[in-house]
Image (cartoon, coloured by chain):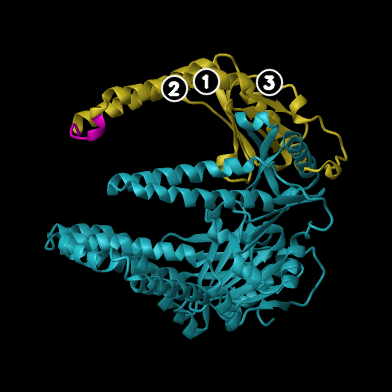
Chain colours: A cyan, B yellow
Amino acid sequence: MTNSYNEPQKLPVNGIWYILTVSLTKTLKTLLVPLIVLITSRRTSDFMWQLLVIVYPVITLINALIKMRTFNYYVQEQSLIIEYGLFKKEKINIPFKKITGINIEQRFLHQPFGLALMKIETAGTNKTEGEIPSIEMRKALELKEIILEKASADETIEEKKEPLLRLNSAQLLRFAISDNHIRTFFLVLGISWIYLNRMRELMGDDWVRDITNKYIFHWYELSVYVYVILIVLILAIAYSVIKTFLKFDGFVLQKDHLSYQYQAGLIDKKNTVIPFRKVQFVRMKTNWWRKKWNIYNIILRQSQAGESNKENKKSFTFPVFDKEMYRNILNTYYHDLTEESATNRVHASYWIRLMIIPSLVIFVVVATAAYFYESYWILLVIIPLMVYQFIVSRLYVKNYRFYVNEEAVQIDSGVWGRQVELLQWKNIQNIGITQTVLQKRKAVANVQLVTASGIITIPYINYEDALRIQNHVVYVTAQSSRSWL
Amino acid sequence: MNRENKIVLVEELPIAEEVQYQPLASNYKRVRFWETFIFLIIILVAVYALMYFFPQWKVFRYRYLLGGIWLAYAIFNYISIYLKFKNTGYALRDKDILYKTGWLVKKLQSFPISRIQHASVQSNAVERLFGLSSVSVFTAGSSGDDLTIRGLKKETADRVNLWIAQQIEANDK
């Protein structure tokens, strides 16, 4: 390494474009509401107006420039120092020991200049998070190495990093196509419905009546339906493809003895470090189609530091294209329990509980529709919906199984697809047992495993087993330290 | 769960069910009574205000129904207070804090000492009138699932808070 970063480092001049854009968008966002108010109230000659439109952005830009010119960062013994400010000097001291994650992101305006945005996450409050808005990519990677090295000074094992997983375009395409399009399909339909109503307001009722008479109430013109469904489906698939490539283009996953590192992204390149100890539990999701194609969606749930509930930021999702790799990643956290432990199931009566809320929703929605359209044959729709819900509920209970050993619990569930959740007991923050009056009669209860990254519930198991799990969790947590922070 | 798959406990802990739970202070019922009372009055005032400002709303044609719902809600709440009080209790144990509550849905929670980050004592105006306090226990889990033991005498709450702080410290060593 050529530089030890003990001297204060300035930001590169080219970084100004990114910084200016960020502060401009920020200004726009702040000004949006007042601007709309001012424009609609037609008081454009007002002094307030000029103040807002000219002075405020200028002040923000000058502020951004000052911050950029005075910004510097350096390494000092056991911490990273970030300083900036002219009138009011800010100095942020981030001890290496407290750093829990380093993200290097290459935003669109960074790419032409080979720059990046570096975010340093720490445990505890989210306030102390450090950020270097634009830094040379080379320096960012070197600095990351230094930080990672110093953060784990007591660990002497040096391991060579090698790519664990790469995703090529063909795989990404398969992943996008096998997405669950039913959800997007209904979303598009719903949005079209809203637009149709808005058109009705704009163009008058007659126009809509013409259209609906022509296309919607002519049942014999089935071809129209086929076209509509095809178009919506193509839109849904296109949406999935774009989303997938934006997020996962050029995906590379690396692994060393302490963490995963991954980089991906088409426009905004992201480079993220996920320390193993921060992973609270692992979830795998796959739908019916992906199961056939051996595509597994892995979700690593990290602890959420501080009060902020940035769920998305704290869970990392990526697809894996063979079972071996899926097991490999599972094994880094713990290991598959299906072979070594006995199968446990939930109480058979759980399907009734699963029926209650969907049935109510179905009844209310269908009954309201019948009432408004004054056609009571719509009520017949309830029958197939209920049958479907019945089948889904029974299958869910039939497929639900969980496995326990002294260190972890694994839950396999799913109706058409499959979901696997693997959680080590020591990652549990607190544990609750809930029991309704009806459950009491059957001597069953729900167990809520509260982790630092969400709750996992095991429903309808024997009350005594629930108590046993609770006791075991207390015992395990008493043994292990709080190293996850 | 299958019988042959029992989780083996290396160190036998008393099952949470057999633990002697500490009840809440008996005048906590009165605190809840007044809190509920204030809440119900606020709802009533709000509905009357809406009626005054938006008399054209269709809902207000069903005055008796609205009144009935309010009354039923009030009765349910007051029954809840007493049944919940009977079922609520906490136990401070060596390795965890146990808390049970609820009557329609019973809940038994365990907060391992090693996962507790800190605890605090606080009290609202009604609680202060009756000399009661609450103890909140925080873990790294999502905030909605942290523990608040309400209805403790002020001295008890302070003692519980101190005990938790000592346990955390002893555990960290």
In this view, which residue lies farthest toward the right? Answer: B10
* Number of the front mark, 3 or 1: 1
Q: Mark 1 points at which residue?
A: B81
Chain assignment, label 2? B
Query: Are the residues at dot 2 and dot 3 in contact (C-beta closer than 8 Å)?
Result: no
Residue, x 51% and y 26% (percent of image)?
B123
The stretch in magenta equals B54-60
**Chain bearing mark 3:** B
Question: Quadrant where the N terminus of chain A lies?
Answer: bottom right
How crowded is the residue under tag 2: few (<14 C-alpha within 10 Å), some, or many (20+)? Answer: some
Left or right, A71 with respect to A259, comes to left
Alpha-carbon span between mark 2 and mark 3: 24 Å
How dense is the environment of label 1, judged by Cα within 10 Å: few (below 14), some, or many (20 and up)?
A: many
Of circles 2 and 3, the one toward us is 2
The amino acid on which the numbered mark 3 sits, given as a three-letter code, is Gln
Of helix, strand and loop, which one carries label 1?
helix
Q: Mark 2 points at which residue?
A: B36
Kind of residue sitting beneath label 1: Ile
Residue occupying the point 19% across, 66% down = A210
Which of A444/A310 is in front? A444
Give the camera-side residue of B111 and A154. Answer: B111
Dot 1 falls on which chain? B
* Residue B150 spot, x, y in % from top left: 57, 26
Most extreme residue toward the bottom is A112
User: Where does label 3 land, which residue?
Assistant: B22
- Residue B100 - label: none
Percent position (x, y) of residue A263?
Answer: 60, 75
